[in-house]
Amino acid sequence: MPVISRFNGIVIKMYLRQKEHNPPHIHAICGDNIGMFSLSDGEMFEGDLGNKEQKMVQKFIAKYGKELLDMWETQQFKFLPPVE
């Protein structure tokens, strides 16, 4: 599972499509907590990340949504700069 970004103790990953399912989404990991976030609306649809971490991931998706969706479609992964 490629690492897309790292910031504030959060690691953003995206699984390879053949091992993943729709809707297009990313995985955010912070310590022992994990969240799956939809790329279409930035909402966490599964997981247990805290509110602060959820807001940071949503900010990340808002900033890089187009690039993330392109990675989902093409499977051409790249590292994206962190959000502040």
Image (cartoon, rainbow, N blue to C red):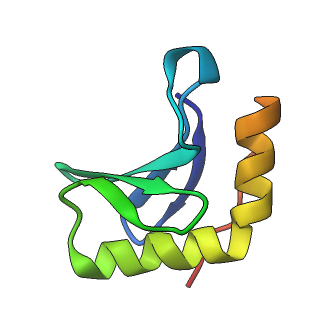
Q: List x then y, in percent, for residue 34.
A: 27, 50
Task: Evaluate whether residue 76 shows in this view.
Answer: no
Q: Looking at this view, is 71 or 5 the one in front?
A: 71
Residue 65: x and y in percent read 70, 64
Q: Confirm whether residue 24 shows in the render.
A: yes
Q: Residue at x 69, y 76 (%)?
A: 63
Compared across the picture, whether 73 is left or right of 27 comes to right
What is the number of callouts on the image?
0
Q: For the point 62% across and 23% down, which residue is it?
A: 17
Q: Quadrant of the C terminus?
A: bottom right
Q: Residue furthest top?
A: 18
Residue 40: which quarter of the image? bottom right
Q: Could you say where residue 61 lies in the image, as x and y percent from the top left?
A: 60, 68
Residue located at (51% from left, 68% from top): 42
Q: Position of residue 77 (x, y in %)?
A: 75, 37
The quadrant where residue 51 appears: bottom left
Q: In this picture, is 14 found above or below 37?
A: above
7, above or below 62, in the image: above
